[in-house]
Image: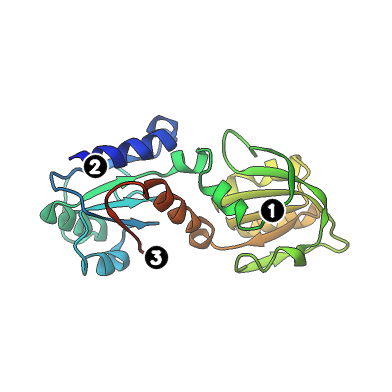
Amino acid sequence: MGIKHDVLSVMRNWAPEDTAESWDNVGLQVDTLRDIDRIALVLELNLDTWDVLQQYNYDFIISHHPLIFKPFRSVGYDDWSHQVLRELIKKDIGFYVSHTNLDRASDGVTDVLMRQFELDIIEQTDIVNGYGKLVSVSKPIDIIDIEDKVPVLAKIVPDQLEIQKVALCGGSGKSFTQDVIDHGADLYITGELGYHDMQALRQQKVAVMLLGHYQSEAFVLDAIQQRLDHLDVDIDIVK
C-alpha cells in the first residue's frame, strides 16, 4: 500500500484534483488492494490500449483521459468502457486519472509541449484561467525554425509572417480561439481545432500549427514518468 500512497501523493501535489473542471472526473477511479510493482502510463484507456496492457502484469494504470466520465446506473457488456472497467475490477488493477487538473498544473500538459519547441522565451502567461500558454520570444522567428520540432498535421501560414508571440495549448484548443486572437498571438500551436476556428484565425492573420489531440498531449507521459522515477516501481509508457 506504500507505493500507491506515494504515487497518489506525487500526482495530487503536482495536479491537485480540486483544480479540475466541475464537469470533469479525475482521481482514483478504480482502487486496488494489490501491492504495486509495475505501473502503466497511458493517454487514455480504451480497447486498443487494453489489448496491449493485458499482456503484462500491471498493478496500476495512470491515464490522462478518464475512463469513467459520466455517471452510469448499471454496468453492462455492450459498452466498451464497461468491458474495460469489468476487466480492471476482475484483475484488481488500480486506475487513476489526471485530466483538466494536469492541463492546468505548473509543468503540466502545455508546459511540456512548449519545451519541445525550444523557444527563447522572455515573457509568458496563461491564455485564460490556467489553460494554455502565451509566450513572447526574444527575437522574431520564422515558422520554418520550429515546424520540424513536432510532427504537424496541418498548418496555416499567412503571408509575411513574423512570429514574436506564440500561443500554445495541448489537446483541444477550440475554446480559446478568440482569446488567442485577442491576445495578439502570431502563431497558435494546439492539438485540435474546428473548421470555423481555423478560419477565424486565418482571417485575423494568425498562423496555426495543428498537431493532433493525442500527439500534442503524449509528451506529458514522459513528465509523469520522471515525476515518479524515484519510486521503487517499474513504470512503462504505453502509447
Coloration of the structure image:
rainbow
Label 2 secondary element: helix
Label 3 secondary element: loop
From this viewpoint, which residue is outermost toward the right? 160
Residue 80 vertical placement versus 26 (above, below)? below
Q: Which of marks 3 and 1 is nearer the N terminus?
A: 1
The answer to whether the residue labelled 2 contacts the one labelled 1, judged by CB atoms less than 8 Å apart, is: no
Label 1 secondary element: strand
Q: Can residue 62 be seen in this view?
A: yes
Q: Where is residue 213 in the image (x, y as percent from the top left)?
A: 51, 59
Q: Residues within 10 Å of mark 1 (few under 14, many from 20)?
A: many
Q: Quadrant of the C terminus?
A: bottom left
Q: Which amino acid does label 1 sit on?
A: Tyr
Q: Name the residue rendered at 57%, 40% in the picture.
A: 131
Q: Name the residue rendered at 51%, 39% in the picture.
A: 104
Q: Where is residue 77 in the image (x, y as percent from the top left)?
A: 16, 60
Q: Earlier in the sequence, mark 2 or mark 1?
A: 2
Residue 141 vertical placement versus 97 (above, below)? below
Q: How crowded is mark 3: few (under 14 residues within 10 Å), some or many (20 or more)?
A: few
> 151 or 6, which is in the foreground?
6
Q: Is residue 15 visible?
A: no
Return the residue at label 1: 188
Q: Which amino acid does label 3 sit on?
A: Lys
Q: Quadrant of residue 182?
A: top right
* Mark 3 or 1, closer to the camera: 3
Q: Quadrant of the N terminus?
A: top left
Return the residue at label 3: 239
Return the residue at label 2: 4
**Badge count:** 3
* Mark 3 or 2, closer to the camera: 2
Residue 188 relative to residue 26: left or right: right
Disc 3 and disc 2: Cα gap in Å?
A: 23 Å
